Image (tube, helix red, strand yellow):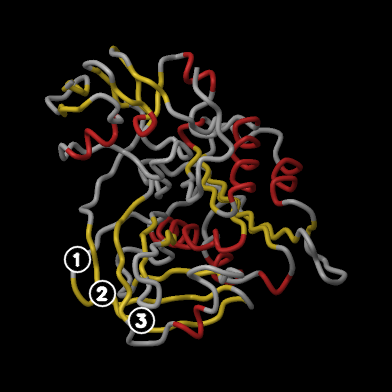
Amino acid sequence: MSHTIRIDGSLDQASAEDGDTILDALLMAGVGFGYSCQAGNCGSCKCELLSGDVTELEYSEHALAPSERARGLVLACRSQVWSDVAVRKLPEEEFLVHPSRILSCGVESLDRLTPDTWRLRLGIVAGGPFDFSPGQYAVLEFPFAPGRERHYSIASRPEEPWLEFHVRESASGVSASIGERLAPGDVVRVRGPHGHAYLRCAQDVPVITIAGGSGIAPLRAILSARHRSGARAPLHVYVGARAEHDLYAEAELRGFLDGCAESRLHVVLSEPESATERRTGMVTDAVAADFASLSGFVAYVAGPAAMVEAAVALLRLKGVSPRHIHCDAFTGPAPVRQAA
């Protein structure tokens, strides 16, 4: 049976069949709507359900807290429709849409940042121009692994003459031994942009960023763009790594603090291999120790899924509004709950 999905306050609407998700139907109809992971992890497609019969699939409480669900909010990507539906976009959410592109890009350089992380720079050969916001990500397909796409944050700013990605080698899979399998001149397929954790520039407000591992990539783009905008509000940058040899871009990150009041780069090692003057432990524990309250801050978080989950929970506890916590989820739907 065919149904209609209507967006309150807009002429936009879409047709849907039984069991289609709200998001899929809207995207198929060409209606612009915020989304990222499409797996119930990120919260980018959160909206208010005004009317209609929907079945909610599994989702993460990081994406939609019980208190939000009690207020009638749902995730468009996890809500299957069984009748006509009306939804309302969250009015306080800033939403940017860039044209989706499929690019052919040539490898310009591939350099080691750490023993297991590479900096990959690509030049656009065909399919451009490519517009994106600092902090977004793209989907890459390497020539040695056709059909096996992977998500990587864009570390470059939109105006830079290349696309930069920080690729961490895995023990197996697409990124294993990437340094031996990819060479200058190879063509990489890039699709995007995607992601909701991009730099918000509407106000010069205090910012805290928390990054782990190659999560430095999107924060490099965000902080670089923020610095070039002339922002002067306090900026606290937290970077977590296992050991000293896993750190990179420290000098560049410190440079982004120039001109910002009461700002600092905090480096935290979880498993130092020798005596160190660095802070040690979990990066989220360092944040917890440093701030009694983070009310009024905007937060950007990137890194391993477990760290992101812990950071988001901590930031909420410290008073950061959920709508001011920005992160993208690249993982599957765990941990999840079954919606009632």
**Kind of element beneath mark 3:** strand
Q: What is the x, y in percent for residue 124? A: 25, 74
Residue tagged 3: 107
**Kind of element beneath mark 1:** loop
Q: Earlier in the sequence, mark 3 or mark 2?
A: 3
Question: At 43% from the left edge and 28% from the top edge, which residue is drawn?
Answer: 57
Amino acid beneath label 3: Val
Q: Quadrant of residue 277?
A: bottom right
Residue 129 is tagged as: 1
Q: Quadrant of residue 193?
A: bottom left
Question: At 24% from the left edge and 18% from the top edge, which residue is drawn?
Answer: 86
Question: At 12% from the left edge and 25% from the top edge, which residue is drawn?
Answer: 11
Horizontal side of residue 294 vs 119, given as left or right: right
Towards the viewer: 125 or 207: 125
Q: Is the residue 162 above or below the residue 47 in the image?
A: below
Towards the viewer: 74 or 34: 74
Q: Which residue is farthest right?
A: 275
**Kind of element beneath mark 2:** strand
Question: At 34% from the left edge and 65% from the top edge, which residue is drawn?
Answer: 147
C-alpha span from label 3 to label 1: 17 Å
Q: Is the residue 69 above or below the residue 233 in the image?
A: above
Q: Quadrant of residue 48?
A: top left
The reply to whether callout 1 and callout 2 are in contact (CB within 8 Å) is yes
Count the marks: how many?
Answer: 3
Q: What is the x, y in percent for residue 324? A: 48, 36
Which quarter of the rendered picture does the N terminus lie within? Answer: top left
Residue tagged 2: 124
Amino acid beneath label 2: Ile
How crowded pointer 3 is (Cα within 10 Å; few <14, some 14-19, many 20+) is rated as many
Q: Earlier in the sequence, mark 3 or mark 1?
A: 3
